[in-house]
Image (tube, rainbow, N blue to C red):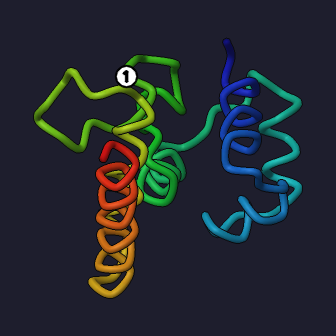
Amino acid sequence: MNQCDRIRLILQENKLKQKELAAEIGVSESYISILLKKPEVSLSRSIAALIEEKYGYSADWVQSGTEPKIKQVSKNRALSELHQKALAQLEKMSDGQVKAVLAFINSLDEIERALLK
């Protein structure tokens, strides 16, 4: 998988348009277009770091494909990639948003307990 494929995957997994990714990381839409078409154009470390910060993908993976794909946010290496991505998103949330997520998780636990009765 080359850099073009990795950028394309980031767009796909996050349901983003090129324009949206460009706006989020502060580059032009034409730059994203070039990254998608020309594997010889290398993404800068600072842009890879912005993608890591905004979307949770490891800057090393974005640039070179070096695993792990998702930035390690937990010391528990046994967590799946999906769990790692969820934790990365939680890190970016405000306290109010985290409280809402926790309330939702707690409601799922209550529903499960009620169904098991």
Q: Secondary structure at mark 1?
A: loop
Q: In this picture, is 86 found above or below 74?
A: below
**Residue 105 at x, y percent in the picture:** 35, 61
85 and 58: which one is in front? 85
In the rendered structure, which amino acid carries the disc numbered 1?
A: Pro
In percent of width and height, residue 9 lies at 71, 32
- For the point 40% across and 48% down, which residue is it? 115
Q: Residue at x 77, y 38 (%)?
A: 35
Q: Is residue 95 left or right of residue 41?
A: left
Q: Quadrant of the N terminus?
A: top right
Residue situated furthest front in the rendering: 117
Label 1 crowd (10 A; few <14 / some 14-19 / many >=20): few
Q: Is residue 56 left or right of residue 41?
A: left
Q: Is residue 95 left or right of residue 46?
A: left
Front-most of residues 77 and 21:
77
Q: Residue at x 40, y 18 (%)?
A: 67
Residue at x-position 88% and y-position 30%: 37
Against 43, residue 21 (above or below) is below
Relative to 100, 24 lies left or right? right
* Residue 58, image quadrant: top left
| Residue found farthest to the top | 1
Residue pointed to by mark 1: 68
Residue 16 image position (x, y, % from top left) = 77, 55
